[in-house]
Image (cartoon, rainbow, N blue to C red):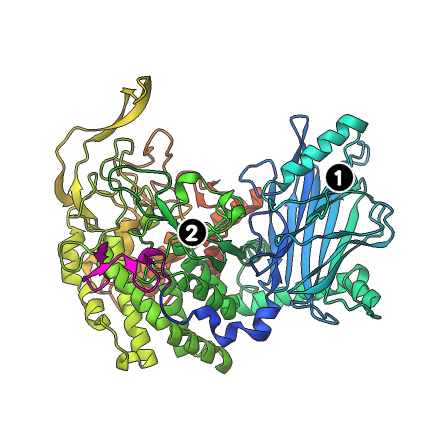
């Protein structure tokens, strides 16, 4: 079998050494995560954490078969008990999220139920610890919100411990006769040695338990509810059975209270047979010492927030709360995943099959996630935006996360754009999005971060130690970044020199009004109506300019000219920044806008039709119909894509086209609103149109923070450089920045949530809840921190 190599040569699809397909063969260079900066003390200090973003509260280690802890609780819904466990994208839970998190050893979260507030805190302590990764504690505060004259209802919490490796967990002796301090469970593991989990509380608690022998944590809440239902049928009481299966590797502890309660749970490891200081270790992790430690971490978080973003004198307290929630939720949403991606690989050219995939090599991924309830997994293009914020807080976290992503590269320089690793991640994604297509890319936003880090070194933002780590990282990363660029520059290249188009659009669909471009990240943003290889996508052209210019900067900055590099990055960057060529390919004088090019007609509709299926039955469905003949032309849809040359500052500061771009941006009949810039112009024929019967408009009008941030960044740039339009750019910049901040803060005040996107007419939050995520870029907008080009 043969295929096309990054250089354009024919090459075998099978890797000769292992006889496995190239698409699942790792890139043959030293891994970035093996760098010494990520080993030793760094690795141990980041071993334990709240690395389970998909659950409301969970702790695990950064190892494939970890000891896992988590919290569930019961609520009544339609008269029936329902278990809260995995984050849900519904308004049943008023709001939840991290108010503070430092990304390393501390976090505080609030969860607002209809009639109670849960506060969960996590903190690590190395003092006196003997086990790998240190000791840690969880504090759960329960505040009943019912009025005093109402009957107090019991609050039922379910704290669990699970050993993913199947190791048996030992039940503590005093679980049912809970004293002020009791051992819940204990065990032994190769990584941390002998361990114990202790519970301590001054409040009256009733406890019950059950134990399971199963590798399935995903359905744990279902197992617990089955146990509760069986016991309720027997005794009429809503309590666990106080029984366990042989060699249980999961124990669930029901903790019931009717009062305001504070519950401390401490994990200690590395326990020797004769450990005289065990009681001291437990005391230091619970009660008043824990209160003092949490207060210390709280003060340190606020101090670092002020140091990193310098906002205290600029903004009101309500806005600062949103800024802290933005960084807290971003850092608290960092997760650890392990598993194998499914990669599309047709077994037969004649027929499609659900088994048309291969498994990528087993891999781990340490990454932030866009949204805990909706998208609790890694997304490639999202991650670049995440790291624009995170590196300003902790550059070491950024380097390790970017390294994890680049280590997922295959031998051809391709990185799967969506990472669905492990059973918990799989449980939160529709089946049709699991398999990744090796022909499809995703915007290389990680290069935005790398460019930022290089500029940070140039402007002396880092101390000497951090500077050396960044340089060491870039030295090893260069060969992978070079391969990544080559993959884009061959697989996504267009017919015309200097043109590119996103692969992966469906050119035979009769269900979508305008075939989606998921690989672009802009999903249903309108492209040419009839996809083919004549397409030219202006956004991808600009991403390729960024990539070439960034690679050229690394070459010059790192002195990489002596290394065998097949791409002439300087020449490619010069070609893609050629203003005349850009205008010839993509500029429409009538609209004063940059547009895609392709085989297009506006005469496409979705109509209801009777459809005969293979089994003979009839159904009424929305079907795409084309009424006009498509022709090669500029695609007349103005929106975010139209502003990419502006975002990437390719337009000269003295060009009249810049003036027209500013007019488009500020035109209330096009994309301007009092809440931010719309993703698609109100004048577009597809503005707020459904793409199919079940595909609601997504990037067809709604206000998205990442693109607003990029446009705002360039408004700031053009307002500070010499040119006839800098005053105009400044005016628009200040008003847009104010609109974005005001709207996000208003929504947060009303809902306690930072949203995925915002309504184009009312500014109300929509889509995924707790989207922090690139919506957390609102913090960089507050602090006026923007990427340099």
Marks 1 and 2: which is nearer the front?
Answer: 2
Which image quadrant: the C terminus?
Answer: bottom left
Task: Give the extent of the magenta segment.
Answer: 1-26
**Comes first in the chain, label 1 or label 2:** 1
Q: In this rendering, would 633 be left or right of 221?
A: left
**Which residue sits at x=45%, y=62%?**
387
Residue 435 in picture, x, y percent from top left: 38, 46
For residue 213, what is the image quadrant? top right
Dot 1: within a 10 Å radius of its alpha carbon, few (fewer than 14), some, or many (20 or more) residues? many
Residue 23: within the magenta? Answer: yes
Above or below 712: residue 696: above
Q: Is residue 540 visible?
A: yes
**What's the mark number on residue 155?**
1
Say which of 166 and 134 sits in front. 166
On the image, the x and y values in percent for residue 339 come to: 49, 53
Q: Position of residue 189 (x, y in %)?
A: 67, 61
Q: Which residue is mark 2?
A: 341
Say few, some or many: other residues with alpha carbon within 10 Å of mark 2 (under 14 / 14 to 19 / 20 or more): many
Q: Is residue 532 magenta?
A: no
Residue 247 image position (x, y, % from top left)? 71, 48
């Amino acid at each position: 079998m043969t295929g096309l190599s990054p250089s354009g040569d024919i090459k075998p699809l099978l890797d000769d050494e292992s006889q496995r397909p190239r698409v699942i063969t790792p890139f043959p260079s030293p891994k970035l995560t093996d760098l010494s900066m990520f080993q030793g003390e760094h690795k141990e200090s980041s071993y334990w954490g709240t690395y389970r973003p998909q659950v409301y509260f969970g702790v695990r280690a950064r190892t494939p078969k970890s000891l896992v802890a988590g919290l569930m609780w019961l609520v009544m819904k339609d008269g029936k008990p329902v278990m809260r466990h995995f984050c849900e994208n519904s308004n049943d839970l008023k709001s939840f999220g991290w108010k503070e998190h430092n990304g390393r050893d501390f976090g505080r979260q609030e969860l607002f139920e209809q009639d109670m507030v849960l506060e969960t805190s996590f903190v690590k302590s190395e003092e006196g610890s003997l086990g790998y990764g240190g000791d840690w504690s969880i504090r759960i505060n329960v505040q009943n919100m019912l009025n005093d004259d109402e009957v107090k209802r019991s609050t039922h919490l379910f704290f669990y411990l699970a050993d993913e490796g199947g190791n048996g967990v030992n039940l503590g002796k005093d679980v049912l006769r809970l004293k002020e301090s009791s051992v819940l469970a204990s065990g032994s593991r190769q990584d941390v040695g002998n361990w114990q989990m202790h519970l301590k509380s001054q409040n009256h608690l009733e406890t019950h338990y059950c134990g399971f022998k199963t590798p399935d944590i995903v359905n744990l809440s279902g197992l617990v509810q089955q146990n509760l239902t069986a016991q309720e049928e027997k005794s009429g009481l809503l309590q666990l059975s106080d029984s366990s299966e042989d060699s249980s590797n999961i124990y669930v502890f029901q903790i019931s209270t009717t009062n305001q309660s504070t519950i401390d749970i401490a994990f200690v490891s590395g326990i020797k047979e004769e450990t005289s200081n065990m009681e001291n270790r437990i005391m230091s992790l619970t009660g008043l010492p824990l209160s003092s430690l949490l207060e210390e971490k709280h003060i340190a978080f606020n101090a670092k927030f002020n140091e990193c973003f310098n906002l205290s004198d600029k903004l009101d307290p309500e806005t600062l709360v949103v800024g802290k929630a933005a960084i807290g939720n971003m850092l608290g949403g960092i997760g650890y995943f392990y598993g194998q991606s499914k990669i599309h690989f047709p077994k037969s050219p004649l027929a499609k099959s659900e088994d048309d995939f291969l498994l990528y090599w087993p891999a781990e991924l340490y990454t932030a996630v866009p949204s805990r309830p909706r998208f609790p997994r890694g997304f490639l293009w999202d991650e670049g935006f995440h790291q624009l914020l995170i590196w300003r807080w902790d550059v070491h976290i950024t380097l390790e996360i970017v390294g994890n992503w680049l280590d997922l590269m295959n031998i051809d320089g391709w990185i799967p754009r969506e990472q669905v690793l492990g059973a918990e991640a799989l449980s939160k994604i529709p089946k049709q999005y699991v398999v990744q297509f090796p022909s499809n890319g995703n915007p290389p936003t990680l290069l935005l971060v790398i460019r930022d880090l290089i500029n940070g070194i140039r402007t002396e933002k880092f101390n000497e130690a951090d500077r050396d780590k960044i340089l060491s990282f870039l030295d090893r990363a260069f060969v992978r970044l070079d391969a990544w660029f080559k993959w884009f520059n061959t697989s996504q290249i267009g017919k015309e020199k200097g043109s590119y188009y996103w692969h992966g659009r469906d050119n035979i669909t009769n269900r979508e009004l305008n075939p989606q471009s998921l690989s672009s990240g802009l999903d249903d943003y309108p492209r040419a109506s009839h996809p083919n290889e004549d397409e030219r996508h202006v956004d991808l052209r600009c991403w390729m300019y960024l990539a070439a210019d960034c690679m050229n900067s690394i070459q010059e900055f790192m002195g990489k000219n002596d290394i065998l590099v097949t791409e002439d990055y300087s020449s490619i960057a010069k070609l893609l920044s050629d203003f005349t060529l850009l205008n010839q390919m993509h500029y429409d004088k009538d609209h004063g806008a940059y547009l895609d090019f392709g085989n297009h007609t506006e005469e496409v509709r979705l109509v209801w039709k009777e459809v005969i299926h293979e089994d003979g039955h009839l159904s009424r469905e929305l079907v795409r119909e084309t009424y006009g003949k498509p022709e090669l032309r500029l695609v007349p849809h103005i929106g975010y894509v139209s502003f990419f040359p502006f975002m990437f500052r390719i337009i000269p500061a003295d060009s009249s086209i810049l003036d027209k771009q500013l007019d488009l941006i500020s035109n209330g009949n096009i994309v301007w609103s009092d809440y931010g810039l719309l993703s698609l112009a109100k004048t577009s024929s597809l503005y707020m149109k459904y793409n199919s019967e079940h595909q609601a408009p997504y990037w067809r009008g709604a206000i998205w923070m990442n693109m607003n941030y990029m446009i705002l960044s360039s408004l700031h740039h053009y307002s500070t450089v010499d040119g006839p339009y800098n005053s105009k750019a400044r005016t628009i910049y200040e008003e847009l920045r104010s609109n974005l901040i005001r709207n996000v803060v208003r929504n947060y005040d009303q809902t306690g949530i930072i949203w995925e996107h915002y309504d184009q007419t009312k500014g109300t939050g929509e889509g995924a809840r707790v989207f922090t995520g690139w919506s957390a870029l609102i913090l960089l907008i507050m602090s006026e921190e923007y990427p340099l080009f």
